[in-house]
C-alpha cells in the first residue's frame, strides 16, 4: 500500500527539480534520489534508484500512474526504464539520451534548496524582509591548516545579512549512519579530528571570530521545531515563522512585524 503523503512529497521534489532546470525535458528517476533522501522521503538509496522505482512499479501495477504526473517509462529488452518529464509534457518521441547538463552538482544544489537549512533561512528572509547571502565565506574565518601546512579553507556560514552585519546558523541534526560507514569515516579522518568533532571546533570558531569582526551570530536550533523520526522538520510555515521570530527577538534582532 502506497503512502499517499509520500506521493505528495515526491511530486513536490520533482516539481522543484523541473522549476530549477527548465532546460531539462527528461531525467532518469535515479538522478533525483539525493533530493528524495534530503526531503526525507527515503532513508537511503540502493541499486541506483530502486526505492523510487518500486513506488513507480506499484503505481503502474495498480493503474495509478496519474498520481505522479511526471512519469515516463520506456521498455527495452523486456526491461522497463523509468524517467521523469515535466508535468503535462508530451511523451518523448525518441528514446532517452543523456543530457550533458544533468550533473551531480546540479542535483546537489537542488537538494540543498530543499533542505531544512534552506527552509529555515527562507523563514529568516521573510521575517527580516531581505535576502541572505547563503554559504558566505569571509577572509578572516578559516579552517585548520591543510596537509600542505600552508593553506586554509574559508569556512562558510549558512546565511549572512550584510546590512544587519548578521550571520544566522541553523543547527541541523545529522542522521545516524550505520556502523560500517562510521568506521570508514573515522579511518578517513585518522590524521585529525573526526567530522563530528571538527564540526564542533568550527562552530566554536564561528562563535568566537564573527563577533570579533563586528558581526553578530544567531544560532537557530533544530529542536525548536516539530520534526519526524528522520529529524526532518514537519513544516508548518505559520508556526515555524513564530518560532524563528522568537529566536531573533531573544537575540535583540529588530524587524517589522
Image (cartoon, rainbow, N blue to C red):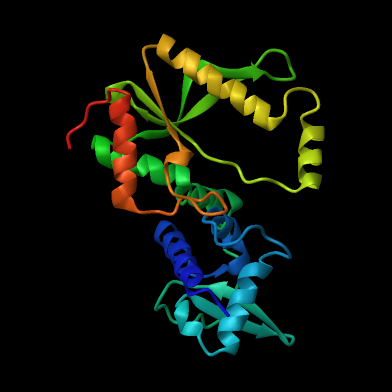
Identify the residue at image location x=55%, y=77%: 2
Residue at 62% of width from left, 81% of height from top? 57
Q: Seen in the image, is 193 located left or right of residue 160?
A: right
Find the residue positioned furthest to the top: 212
Residue name at image x 41 percent, y 13 percent: 211
Q: Residue at x 66, y 85 (%)?
A: 75
**In the rendered picture of this protein, how many numbered marks are placed on residues?**
0
Tell me where residue 59 appears, x and y as whole percent: 56, 83
Q: Position of residue 129 (x, y in %)?
A: 23, 37
On the image, the x and y values in percent for residue 111 come to 52, 51
Residue 89 seen by the camera: yes
Residue 106, compared with residue 242, is above or below; it is: below
Q: Quadrant of residue 101?
A: bottom right
When the figure is inspected, residue 90 is found, relative to residue 194, above or below; the finding is below
Depth check: 47 or 25 in front?
A: 47
Q: Quadrant of the C terminus?
A: top left
Place residue 142 in its image quadrant: top right
User: Foreground residue, 12 or 80?
Assistant: 12
Judge left or right: residue 12 versus residue 162.
Answer: right
Looking at the image, the residue that sits furthest to the left is 256
Q: Position of residue 35 (x, y in %)?
A: 54, 56
Examine the rendering and report whether any part of residue 95 can be seen. Answer: no
Judge from the rendering whether residue 226 lies leftward or rightward of residue 205; answer left or right: left
* 243 w.r.t. 139: above or below: below
The quarter of the image holding the N terminus is bottom right
Amino acid at each position: 500500500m502506497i503512502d499517499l503523503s509520500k506521493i505528495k512529497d515526491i511530486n513536490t521534489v520533482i516539481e522543484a527539480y523541473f522549476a530549477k532546470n527548465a532546460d531539462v525535458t527528461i531525467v532518469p528517476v535515479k538522478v533525483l534520489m539525493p533530493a528524495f533522501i534530503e526531503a526525507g522521503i527515503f532513508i537511503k538509496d540502493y541499486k541506483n534508484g530502486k526505492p523510487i522505482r518500486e513506488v513507480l512499479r506499484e503505481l503502474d501495477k495498480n493503474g495509478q500512474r496519474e498520481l505522479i504526473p511526471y512519469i515516463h517509462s520506456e521498455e527495452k529488452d523486456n526491461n522497463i526504464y523509468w524517467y521523469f518529464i515535466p508535468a503535462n509534457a508530451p511523451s518523448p518521441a525518441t528514446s532517452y539520451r543523456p543530457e550533458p547538463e544533468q550533473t551531480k552538482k546540479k542535483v546537489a544544489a537542488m537538494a540543498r534548496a530543499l533542505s531544512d537549512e534552506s527552509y529555515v533561512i527562507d523563514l529568516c528572509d521573510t521575517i527580516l524582509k531581505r535576502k541572505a547571502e547563503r554559504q558566505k565565506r569571509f577572509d578572516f574565518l578559516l579552517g585548520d591548516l591543510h596537509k600542505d601546512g600552508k593553506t586554509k579553507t574559508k569556512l562558510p556560514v549558512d546565511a549572512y545579512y550584510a546590512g544587519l552585519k548578521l550571520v544566522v546558523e541553523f543547527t541541523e541534526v545529522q542522521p545516524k549512519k550505520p556502523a560500517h560507514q562510521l568506521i570508514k569515516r573515522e579511518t578517513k579522518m585518522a590524521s585529525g579530528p573526526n567530522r563530528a568533532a571538527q564540526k564542533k571546533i568550527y562552530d566554536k570558531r564561528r562563535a568566537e571570530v564573527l563577533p570579533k569582526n563586528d558581526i553578530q551570530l544567531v544560532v537557530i536550533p533544530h529542536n525548536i521545531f516539530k520534526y519526524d523520526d528522520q529529524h526532518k522538520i514537519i513544516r508548518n510555515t505559520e508556526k515555524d515563522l513564530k518560532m524563528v521570530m522568537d529566536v531573533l527577538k531573544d537575540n535583540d534582532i529588530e524587524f517589522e512585524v
